[in-house]
Amino acid sequence: MAKPLSIRENVCLRAFNTFQFDVRARYFVSVRKVSELMAALLWAKERNLDPLILGGGSNLVLVDQVNTLVIHIAKMGKYWRDVEGDRATLILGAGENWHDAVLYAAAANYRGIENLALIPGTVGAAPVQNIGAYGVELGDTLESLLALDCETGELVELTNPDCRFSYRDSLFKHRPDRYIILEVSLRLCRSKPFSLGYGELRNYFAQPEGALTPLTVAQGVMAIRRRKLPDPPQLPNAGSFFKNPEVSMPTWQRLRSEFPGIVGYPGTHKVKLAAAWMIDQCGWKGFRNERVGVHNRQALVLVNHARGTGRDILALADQIRSAVWARFGVALDIEPRVYPQGREGRE
Ligand code: EPU
């Protein structure tokens, strides 16, 4: 007989969101298997509750008490499939820690995700915002993923194009309640060139590429990140709080003539602006009040100094957005998911 679900009541979520906001879930369950997930969803449906699905909580702003069932995805597992010549597919359970998965692939000498070392969160959350760093995005190696389609109740395999990845964006951001990601398959390779074009990485690795391994590249990325990004357990945060906004070529020309130092990365039709630079120019870097603030080494990262709340962080984000808008005429979009929805304060 299947084990009954162990649903707990009034559970503190501090350890389940990297901002460490002290909010409570009315009900909470951790699921390790698809059958447990199905049972939890049924339990919620019978009580007319819309569950909140949670991975590592590293890209989440909890604004209020969570008056529903939190389903924590803890489906584990790491194994290799389709090993052919230099290539292999790494299958990862959604509950696995992302950084551990990067080190696991790198230790087996497979390349493709080493630039994504030290990104907080779980494997299942990684496709949602198409995590990216130092010139690499998850969408570059993700082959397919297994998800529960909550509309049909069926397990589905979504291919890379199905996921509609783009910069910090995917199908899952637009349909947050439709799919629950259970397993991710990455196609990795032992011989492809490393992506070391990103300025800081290039400078870090002065040695020729021949001497590098996926593990040494991952270690370099870790050293660079540790220099300027706060470690959530020590200084609670959710990584970049704003996306780098994309503007049209004419807007870019206008901004460049008005602000010669502005940092932008031109693409084919649009230019991605460094939001951190604009926030920094507005004087917000290192700002803090008694509870929350802006990190003093990376202006894109908002931090919870002491007993801050989701509302404190959103209020600070609003002030920053207004300042950037007033000075540059550029709107910043916030990156993490806000729960409950509709508290983002977008214009
Ligand atoms: N800059 C400033 N002030 C700052 C920080 C940066 O002027 O406080 C300038 C830098 O000098 C640089 C530019 O802004 O010219 C860009 O900065 P950086 O290279 O640090 O990258 P970013 O655009 O701020 C993005 C990602 C990071 C990722 C890095 C490296 C987004 C929203 N953020 O930051 O991702 O680690 O590139 O690839 O795209 C995350 O998503 O949580 C995250 C940390």
Image (cartoon, grey):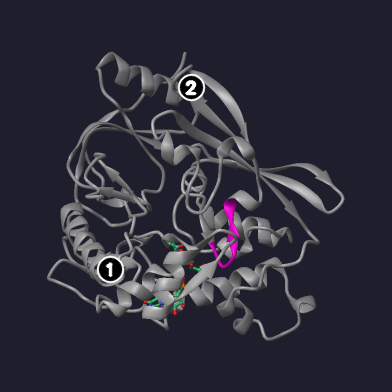
Q: In the rendered image, which residue does mark 1 sit on?
A: 324
What amino acid does circle 1 point to? Val
Q: Residue at x 36, y 17 (%)?
A: 42
Image spot of residue 169 (x, y percent): 48, 47
Judging depth in this view, the residue of 25 and 186 nearest the camera is: 186
- Where is 52 relative to 151, above or below? below
Q: Residue at x 46, y 38 (%)?
A: 172
Q: Position of residue 28 (x, y in %)?
A: 29, 33
* Mark drawn on residue 24: none
Q: Quick check: which quadrant has ligand 1?
A: bottom left
On the image, the x and y values in percent for residue 337 come to: 34, 46
Confirm or deny contact between disc 2 and disc 1 (CB under 8 A). no
Q: Disc 2 or 1, which lies upstream in sequence?
A: 2
The amino acid marked with disc number 2 is Ser
Callout 1 environment at 10 Å: few (<14), some (14 to 19), or many (20+)? Answer: many
Q: Position of residue 216 (x, y in %)?
A: 66, 73
Up-down: is 108 above or below 274? above
CB of mark 2 near ligand 1 (< 8 Å):
no
Q: Is residue 193 magenta?
A: no
| Viewer-side residue, 212 vs 108 | 212
In this view, which residue lies farthest toward the left? Answer: 290
**Position of 77 relative to 210 (above/below):** above
- Occupied quadrant, residue 201: bottom right
Highlighted magenta segment, given as a residue range: 133-138
**Image-based side of 296 in relation to 217, left or right:** left
Q: Which residue is mark 2?
A: 35
Residue displayed at 58% across by 78% down: 199
In this picture, residue 163 sits left or right of residue 112? left
In the structure shown, which secondary structural element does the residue marked by tag 2 occupy? helix
